[in-house]
Image (cartoon, rainbow, N blue to C red):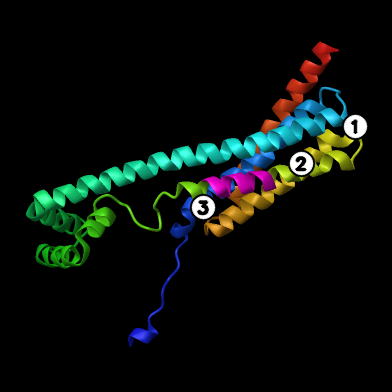
Amino acid sequence: MTRSGHHRETHVASRIGWLRAAVLGANDGIVSTASLIVGVAASDTTRASVLVAGVAAAVAGALSMAAGEYVSVSSQADTERADLAREAQELKQRPESELQELARIYEDRGVEPAIARAVAEQMTAKDALAAHARDELGLSEALAAKPLQAAMASALTFTAGAAAPLAVVPLVKMSMIVPAVGIVSIICLSVLGALGAKAGSAPIWPGVLRVSFWGALAMGVTALVGRLFGGAVS
């Protein structure tokens, strides 16, 4: 087969960074905003109060998700950089030992010792640090931590998720806000679970059931709290 006959495969692992942040952001946007709306509406308050609470939850949640993702993924990136710096120093100080270590890694994966040594030498000659980062530390460009990307994905998808339950509030009667928001949110969570599973090439129904169950539980608990709190205050 000629080189032109080769094809470059695309694997879902390259999507893990933004996909995790996007799914988490959208899921949290729907669940937290819908739960707050349901809880406030169940306390027999006004439509204006429900809207204010929902918008505040959407804005605060989006900023919180962005900050949380940025800090968390930045910490991961710092750890990766520290590991790479340590590995680069070891390659300078004891190259032969590192070469043997790389060869042993390939041997442990089933490669014959002589071939493992030859592969390690070739990989080291091309890019020793990249070889150790990938095969010893488990780091790669596709899976590298990207703080800004994760923060933006979380904030945008949280806002998109929060918009669904928020849009229901001005469209239905006050007495129907709780069930309407609940139904719309479960539908959106089901779609989100299916899309996340499809994007990650995973089974669809487990993803749908997971997000739907926890979303329904969160809304049910906050509705109960709102009802109890509203009754106590009144």
SS for tag 2? helix
Between the C-alphas of marks 2 and 1, the distance is: 15 Å
> In this rendering, would 66 be left or right of 51?
left
- In percent of width and height, residue 127 lies at 22, 63
SS for tag 1? helix
Instruction: Confirm or deny contact between disc 2 and disc 1 (CB under 8 A).
Output: no
Residue 172 visible within the image:
yes
Amino acid type, callout 3: Trp
Between the C-alphas of marks 2 and 3, the distance is: 24 Å
Image quarter of the C terminus: top right
Residue ID for mark 3: 18
Residue ID for mark 1: 175
- In percent of width and height, residue 107 lies at 16, 58
Q: Earlier in the sequence, mark 1 or mark 3?
A: 3
**Residue count near mark 2 (Cα–Cα under 10 Å), binned few <14, some 14–19, many ≥20:** many
Residue 112 shown in magenta: no
Residue ID for mark 2: 165
> In this rendering, would 90 be left or right of 56?
left
Q: Earlier in the sequence, mark 2 or mark 3?
A: 3
Mark identifier at residue 6: none
**Residue count near mark 3 (Cα–Cα under 10 Å), binned few <14, some 14–19, many ≥20:** many
Q: Nearer the viewer, residue 63 or 139?
A: 63
Image quarter of the N terminus: bottom left
Amino acid type, callout 1: Ser
Magenta part of the protein: which range? 151-160
Between the C-alphas of marks 1 and 3, the distance is: 39 Å
60 lies above or below 76:
above
Q: Nearer the viewer, residue 199 or 214?
A: 199
> In this rendering, would 61 be left or right of 166?
left
Q: Earlier in the sequence, mark 2 or mark 1?
A: 2
